[in-house]
Amino acid sequence: MKTLTVIDTFGFFFRSFYALPPLKNSQGFPTGLLTGFANLIYNLEKEYPTDYLLFALDAPGPSFRQKIDPNYKAQRPEAPPELKQQLPVAIEWIEKMGLSKLSLENFEADDVIASMVKCAKEQGIKVRIVSHDKDLYQLVDDGKVVLFDPMKKVEMDEEGVYQKYGVHPRQFTDYQALIGDSSDNVPGVPGIGPKTAVKLLSQFDTLDNIYAKIDEVKPERIKNLLIKHKDDAYRSKELVTLRSDIFDNCDLTAFSMPPNDPLVNIKDELEKYELRNILRRIEKETSVGTVNEPKKKSLSFEPVLIDNARKLFEVLESIDDDALVSFDTETDALDTKTASIVGFSFCFEESKAYYVPIAHNYLGVGSQVSLEDAKKALEILFKKRLFGHNLKFDLGLLYKVFGFDEVEPFADTMLLAWLVDPEGAVGLDRLSMRYFDYEMVSFKDTVKKGENFSSVHIEEACKYAAEDAWMSYKLYFKLIEILKLQGAEHLISEAKNIEYPFINLLICMEHHGIAIDIDRFESLKNEISGRLKELTSQIYELAGQEFNINSPKQLGHILFEVLELPTGKKTKTGYSTNEKVLDSLKDAHPIIPKIQDFRELHKLMSTYIDPLLKLGKKDSKHRIYTSFMQTGTATGRLSSKNPNLQNIPVKTEEGRRIREGFIASEGYKLVGIDYSQIELRFLAHFSEDPVLTKAFKDNKDIHMETAIKLFGPEEAASKRNIAKTVNFGLLYGMGSRKLSQTLGISTKEAKVIIENYFASFPTVKEFLLSIESKAKEQGYVETLLGRRRYFDFEHANAMQMAAYLREAGNTLFQGSTADLIKMAMLNIHKMIKEQNLDAAILLQIHDELIFEIKDEEAELLASKFSQIMVESIKLNVPLKTSINIGKRWSELK
């Protein structure tokens, strides 16, 4: 598939300017932005080849959005002089390099990007958008459109958007319409923040559906805010929705990458602005005539093929007992439950690595090591100080294939890389580039499309596989060195005590899975299918003909041409039939509410019922197996994927019906144990506030105690929910303006509440401010176990600074909770193993654990596990949990 890379030009330039130090040439001209730009061009084609490249620009003057709302972007601060000096130079460079730029009067760069995305998708071309702008998340489409961060070198797909915001890309404009955007003066619905927006969209799916079912919105305060600010919400959606139809036609060949390195065309400019590092790189390549050849590897090693048992055991015997050995497996699939081993590689010295083929399968394949000898060899390796990169995969595979007992790894370089930089990419190839400027052999260049690793010729496989083990070996020492340089040597122990043992626990959870009630899902599917069929019939009867209800084009034809309903805007692709349009027509014809019901049920079927039922039927025990990601978040929380079982809805009727379908096996119960108000307990522990601490020690209702402090005993009961909002809001840096919006009160009233709160808990404010000041002073914040999250305060603008400070507090409390629950899980897992208990940890969802336990032992073991959870660490305040037991997941809350 060909690729179009579109650069959000000004967005990238601004970020480069703030990300790099205030560089200048000898004439005093600022060069930070120019340096970042040159580095992007140098790295882009070498690391992320593209067929077409386009720089999208804002057109001069106001866009059509200012006509919708004159306040749109009205308060954007003036760009710093040093930035304004470099912008025209950088834009001129685009043309001098022979690259393409595009803008259109009355539109913004984001509209250009959206229109190019539509054009590329129609032509089957993948789009990589280089931007950090959340407005573009609405365009993300798995397999077709990703957002790429060139500084962190990570791509944002649909799952990434969901993990970050809790909504799907298709819901992003509705999400922005609800929360607004203060940086662009997009009003949103005052009083509704991200969490509330996520809850609303989780329940109602779209903004239109929220208003269509406004009477179902709870609590009353939120419903009233939505009603009051409906015009604001829809105006906001209009402001944030990108236009994808601004060009009559598009010929992507106009944006083809030039045949030569674009930087060669601006060598004189690079010399003028003294970008010497870039100059040295391109001059070196030019001198050896390799400008258009793949990047040369400055590092080298010897890949050694071991294709017989005698040679294999000779090499293994030569390894010292205390040697560090890196290890990797090659398989014929990526799912360890179904994959078979094809070979393995290992490395125990600086300049040599070995590959052992086991099950390559092609015509004329050479000699290989038998599975039996491979097992003996692995047993020897397991006695060494063995490590690897993403060992959860390798060990999970080997446990299944060979039935090995759990092996405690010496290290895992993926986890070490995450501890070094929890927001950086942790893939081996990315780390190789980052730390060694070394480009590894790619999987796609090794394995032909439609084949697997067993089809790769052994000699070629040796180069690829041995390189993985060799790079892991080098990376281990590099990462240990970085931790020491960071003054974070304590994380080596944290990794050994927590992160590495946690690998085996996650393998157990992934292999155990969770059962679903096929009959319940089938019944639900039949019920929904029946309702959909009935609705389809009713819609056809009302329309007077059959058509594809899911086709906006055909639906538009029926509504506005056949039934002649009042038309909205007609685009090039037909009439708009989105929820807003349907909602405006709900009283115009009885077909409209039928279509709205059809859409809601169809989403329930396609998003949850069908995918989960399909996965359950694939397994003989009707169990669903998720993959847990230990490095998936910067705070340390676990995340899950394929499927994401941490996101099954809980607060809607539909969500509860889905959870009813998750069950315990015959003879077992599901047990849910979650920590009570854990983040507030950490606040009491860290701040040592005497009032807060005493309330927890006396086992008081902390929200009621806060209400009493703020409003007095007589009003406390009626205002407990307000106190709860204040407790959690101030924990994460909520100010008076946000509190006033959330509670629907004046800013003055909110300010008084905050002042009273901090007066009631005297050391809390001082502690929360100390988090910020310490983070700014150190450049990072530490969790309970000393895991760090770093922030680039030095180059942050005002908005970034505010975000970093919020994230610092968020990391301390959420990260410490993640530390605690990991320790508890490890202690419980150890108990299950040592006592051979008939119990298993199934899921971890933030501060809750879900177990499957034998019926007759459920209550006893739930009590024991709860005790372990509250005793896993001693805080200044007691920990508390709640226990729920049932046959179905829906019964646990």
Image: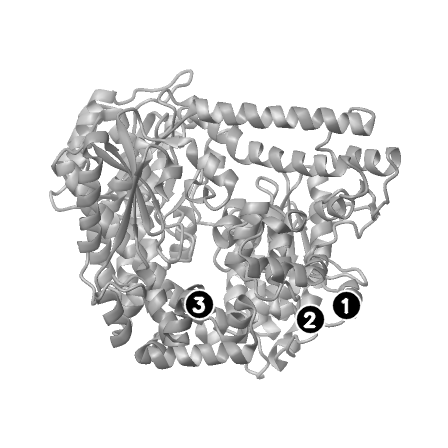
Q: Nearer the viewer, residue 505 or 262?
A: 505
Residue at horizontal 37%, vertical 38%? Answer: 891
Give the residue type that dot 3 points to. Answer: Lys
The secondary element bearing badge 2 is classed as loop
Residue at horizontal 26%, vertical 38%? Answer: 346
| Whether residue 354 can be seen here | no
Residue 139 x/y as whole percent: 64, 49
Mark 2 vs 3, N-terminal side: 2
Q: Is residue 24 above or below residue 852?
A: below
Q: Which mark is residue 66?
A: 1
Q: Which mark is residue 73?
A: 2
Give the residue type that dot 2 points to. Answer: Lys
Mark 2 vs 1, N-terminal side: 1
**Res 337 → quadrant:** top left
Give the residue type that dot 1 points to. Answer: Gln
**Res 393 → quadrant:** top left
Q: Which mark is residue 286?
A: none
Residue 762 x/y as whole percent: 32, 80
Q: Residue furthest top?
A: 363
The secondary element bearing badge 3 is classed as helix
Q: Is residue 722 above or below residue 121?
A: below
